[in-house]
Image (cartoon, coloured by chain):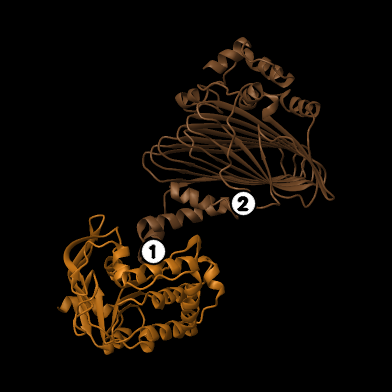
C-alpha cells in the first residue's frame, strides 16, 4: 500500500465505524479524518470506546467491524492483519505496553524496524547497523543503552515503558501514530521527555491521534482538533479550547450535552 | 515382543555378563511393567509395544556424530565405539572403570530395585553388553568439557549404559546426546555417583528421527556438599520416556533441574522424576516445561520425598506447560510427600497457550504472526537451553527447535 496520494489527501479516514466484541457493541458510528501534519486529541470518560477505537484501527483480532470503513492512505484496511497495517505505517502506542519476558528489547526493535523497512523497500539492518540507529533514537527519549539488553518492557517502570513506546515510534517512522493514554502514569519530567520525543518525530507528513484524559499532555503538544467521545460515538469536535472547556466543566457536561442534542 | 520372550526364557541372550544375568533374573517372573501402576498408566500401550518390537542389534554401523568436534578442548566419547580412555593430566584424570568396579557400582544400585519402578534400568542392563557400557572415574578440576553420544541404529533396539563416578572435589561439564534413528529404539541408562564436594553441570539432549523411540533413565546419587545441575531437552520421538531418580544420601546437597519436552504430530514424551532427600539441609530447584502441538501427548510426573530426617529441606518443583493445539494433551502432576516438619517446599503447575496480547503487541510492530510465535517460543525455550552445558556455542539447539516447531 505505497502512497500514491497527494499531500493534501487524508492519511486516515474512519467513516461511520461501528464495532463489537462478543456481540457487545462498543463503537456506534465513529467518524474521524486525519490529514498530514495534523494532531487530533480524543478525550472521554473511561469505557467510552477511545482505546477500542485505537485497537480496531491497529487491527486487534478480538473486535468485529459491524459497519463502516477504515481507510489508510485512501485504501480500505478493514480486512488487513495487524502486522500489515503496522508495516504500512500505522503505529499504536499502548496504554499498558506488554511485557514479553525472554525476548530481548534490542532484537524486538530490530525485527520490527526491519519489517517496516522491508515494506518501504529500504535495506534491512544487521545488528551492528541497527545498534547505530537505535543509539541515535535513544537520545530522543533520553533512554539508556541498558534498556536494549533487557527483555521487552519487563521490569520497566511505567515511565520507561512509555518511553520505550516512543522509541519504537521513532524507529518505525509511521505515517500515523495513535497514542493511547501515553501520558498516564508519567511524572512531570517524564511527560516532558515523552512529549518532546513525540514533537520531534511528528512532521508535516505524519498524523497523530492522542488519546488522553488530561489537559497536561495537550499543554505540551497542542492539538489541531479535539474530539469528545461518549458511549461509542464522537459527540463533539472543536479546537484546542474544547479540551480546556472539558477540563473546566468535567465529563458531566458531556452527559448534559447528549441530553440537549 | 521378541525381547520379552528372550528374557522370559533366558535362552537367546548369549555370552551374558554377570550384570545381565542378575537383571534378567529380576525380570524373569514379571518381564513387563504394570500398566495400571501410577508410573505406567498414561503410557501409550501401542507405542510402548513398538519400542520393544525391534531386535537387539549386535553389529552396529559406524556412527557419524552430527557435529564436528571443533574444540580440541572437548573430550568426545561414543558409547559402543571408542570406550577406551585413560587421560592422566596434571590437574585431572579420566579413567575407565574396571569391570569389577562397574559391576559393584551397578549391583549396589539395582540390588534394591523395584521391578516396576526401575523396569527401564533392568531392561537396559539385561540387554547392554560389555561393549555398550561406558564407565568413567573422573578426578580433579579444570577438566575439559565432555560430550558423550549414544545412538540407535535403523530398525533395531540398542541398549547403552553410562556410569560416571565423580571423586571428591571434582567438577565437570558433561553433555550427553542421545540420538534416535529412523525406526529405532534406544534404551539409555545413566548412573552418576557424586562424592563429597563434587559438582556437575549435566546436559541431556535427546532427539530422534521418524518413528524413533527412547527409554532414557538417569540415576544420581549425591553425597553431602555435592551439586548436581541438570538441563535436559527431549524432542522428535514417536515415543520417549525420561526417568530421573536423584538421591541426596545424607542431605546437605544441591540439585537444580531444568527440563523440557516438545511433542508434535502424535508423539508421546514423558518425564518422571523422583527426588529423595535422605538428610537435612537438602536443596532442590526444579522446573519442567512441556510443549505439545498437533495431536501429541506430553506427560510430567514429579515426586519429592522429604522424610523426617530431612529437616530444613528447601525444595521447589514447578511444571510449566504450553498447549499449542486443541487436540494436544498434557498431563502433569508435581507431588510432594513431606514427613519432616521444618521444611520449605512448594510445587505448582500451569498449562497455557501462547499469550494473545503479547502476540498482538508484536504484530502491531509489523512482526508477522509466525515470527511473533517464534519469538515467544524462543523465550520459552531459552530458559532451559541456557542451562544445558557445552551446547551453548555450537549446538544450535534453539534453531533446531524453532525450525521444527
In the figure, is residue A169 to the left or right of A89?
right
Q: Residue furthest left?
A: A261
Residue B9 location, quadrant: top right
Number of the label disc, if any, that sits on residue A54:
none
> What colour is chain A?
orange
Q: Mark 2 or mark 1, which has the lower sequence index? A: 1
Is residue A215 among what the camera can see?
yes
Residue B399 position within the rendered picture, expressed as x and y whole percent measured from the top left: 49, 52
Q: Tell me the CA gap for discs 2 and 1.
A: 29 Å
Number of the label disc, if any, that sits on residue B361:
1
Where the C terminus of chain A falls, by quadrant? bottom left
Relative to B32, is B151 above or below? below
The reply to whether callout 2 and callout 1 are in contact (CB within 8 Å) is: no
Residue B225 position within the rendered picture, expressed as x and y whole percent measured from the top left: 79, 46
Q: Which residue is mark 2?
A: B387
Relative to A28, is A140 above or below? below
Q: Residue at x 75, y 38 (%)?
A: B85
Residue A148 position within the rendered picture, expressed as x and y whole percent measured from the top left: 52, 71
Q: Residue furthest front?
A: B62
In the figure, is residue A97 to the left or right of B142?
left
Chain at tag 1 = B
In the figure, is residue B228 to the left or right of A138?
right
Amino acid at each position: 500500500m505505497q502512497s500514491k496520494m497527494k499531500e493534501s489527501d487524508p492519511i486516515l479516514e474512519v467513516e461511520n465505524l461501528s464495532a463489537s466484541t462478543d456481540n457487545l457493541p462498543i463503537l456506534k458510528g465513529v467518524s474521524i479524518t486525519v490529514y498530514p501534519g495534523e494532531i487530533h486529541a480524543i478525550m472521554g470518560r473511561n469505557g467510552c470506546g477511545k482505546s477500542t477505537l485505537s485497537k480496531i484501527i491497529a487491527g486487534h483480532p478480538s473486535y468485529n467491524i459491524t459497519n463502516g470503513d477504515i481507510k489508510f492512505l485512501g485504501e480500505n484496511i478493514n480486512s488487513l492483519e495487524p502486522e500489515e497495517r503496522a508495516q504500512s505505517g500505522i503505529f499504536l502506542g499502548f496504554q499498558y505496553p506488554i511485557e514479553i519476558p525472554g525476548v530481548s528489547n534490542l532484537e524486538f526493535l530490530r525485527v520490527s524496524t526491519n519489517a517496516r523497512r522491508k515494506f518501504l523497500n529500504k535495506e534491512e539492518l544487521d545488528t551492528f547497523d541497527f545498534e547505530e540507529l537505535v543509539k541515535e533514537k535513544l537520545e530522543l527519549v533520553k533512554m539508556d543503552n541498558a534498556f536494549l539488553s533487557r527483555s521487552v518492557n519487563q521490569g520497566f517502570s511505567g515511565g520507561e515503558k512509555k518511553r520505550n513506546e516512543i522509541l519504537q515510534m521513532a524507529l518505525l517512522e509511521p505515517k500515523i501514530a495513535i497514542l493511547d493514554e501515553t501520558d498516564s502514569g508519567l511524572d512531570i519530567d517524564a511527560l516532558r521527555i515523552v512529549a518532546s520525543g513525540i514533537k520531534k518525530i511528528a512532521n508535516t507528513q505524519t498524523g497523530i491521534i492522542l488519546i488522553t484524559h488530561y489537559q497536561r499532555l495537550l499543554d505540551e503538544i497542542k492539538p489541531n482538533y479535539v474530539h469528545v467521545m461518549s458511549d461509542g460515538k464522537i459527540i463533539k469536535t472543536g479546537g484546542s479550547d474544547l479540551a480546556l472547556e472539558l477540563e473546566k466543566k468535567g465529563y458531566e457536561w458531556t452527559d448534559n450535552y447528549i441530553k440537549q442534542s | 515382543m521378541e525381547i520379552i520372550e528372550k528374557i522370559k526364557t533366558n535362552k537367546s541372550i548369549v555370552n551374558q555378563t554377570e550384570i545381565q544375568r542378575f537383571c534378567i533374573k529380576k525380570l524373569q517372573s514379571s518381564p513387563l511393567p504394570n500398566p495400571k501402576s501410577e508410573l505406567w498408566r498414561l503410557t501409550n500401550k501401542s507405542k510402548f509395544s513398538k519400542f520393544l518390537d525391534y531386535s537387539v542389534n549386535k553389529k552396529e554401523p559406524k556412527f557419524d556424530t552430527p557435529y564436528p568436534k571443533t574444540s580440541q578442548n572437548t573430550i568426545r566419547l561414543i558409547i559402543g565405539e571408542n570406550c577406551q580412555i585413560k587421560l592422566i593430566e596434571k590437574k585431572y584424570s579420566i579413567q575407565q572403570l574396571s569391570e569389577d568396579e562397574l559391576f559393584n557400582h551397578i549391583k549396589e544400585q539395582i540390588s534394591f530395585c523395584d521391578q516396576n519402578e526401575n523396569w527401564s534400568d533392568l531392561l537396559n542392563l539385561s540387554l547392554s553388553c560389555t561393549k555398550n557400557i561406558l564407565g568413567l572415574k573422573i578426578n580433579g578440576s579444570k577438566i575439559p568439557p565432555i560430550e558423550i553420544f549414544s545412538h540407535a541404529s535403523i530398525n533395531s533396539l540398542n541398549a547403552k549404559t553410562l556410569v560416571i563416578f565423580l571423586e571428591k572435589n571434582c567438577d565437570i561439564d558433561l553433555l550427553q546426546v542421545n540420538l534416535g534413528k529412523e525406526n529405532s529404539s534406544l534404551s539409555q541408562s545413566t548412573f552418576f555417583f557424586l562424592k563429597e564436594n563434587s559438582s556437575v553441570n549435566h546436559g541431556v539432549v535427546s532427539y530422534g528421527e521418524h518413528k524413533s523411540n527412547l527409554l532414557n533413565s538417569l540415576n544420581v546419587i549425591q553425597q553431602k556438599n555435592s551439586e548436581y545441575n541438570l538441563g535436559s531437552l527431549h524432542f522428535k520421538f514417536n515415543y520417549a520416556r525420561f526417568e530421573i531418580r536423584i538421591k541426596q544420601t545424607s542431605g546437605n546437597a544441591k540439585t537444580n533441574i531444568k527440563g523440557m519436552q516438545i511433542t508434535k504430530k502424535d508423539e508421546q514424551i514423558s518425564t518422571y522424576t523422583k527426588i529423595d532427600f535422605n538428610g537435612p539441609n537438602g536443596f532442590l530447584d526444579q522446573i519442567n516445561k512441556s510443549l505439545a502441538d498437533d495431536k501429541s501427548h506430553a506427560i510430567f510426573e514429579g515426586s519429592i520425598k522429604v522424610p523426617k530426617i530431612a529437616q530444613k529441606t528447601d525444595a521447589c518443583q514447578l511444571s510449566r506447560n504450553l498447549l499449542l493445539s486443541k487436540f494436544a494433551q498434557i498431563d502433569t502432576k508435581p507431588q510432594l510427600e513431606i514427613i519432616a516438619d521444618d521444611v520449605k517446599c512448594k510445587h505448582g503447575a500451569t498449562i497455557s497457550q501462547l499469550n494473545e496480547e503479547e502476540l498482538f503487541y508484536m504484530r502491531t510492530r509489523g512482526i508477522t504472526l509466525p515470527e511473533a510465535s517464534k519469538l515467544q517460543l524462543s523465550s520459552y525455550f531459552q530458559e532451559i537451553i541456557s542451562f544445558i552445558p557445552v551446547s551453548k556455542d555450537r549446538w544450535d539447539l534453539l534453531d533446531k527447535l524453532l525450525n521444527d516447531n
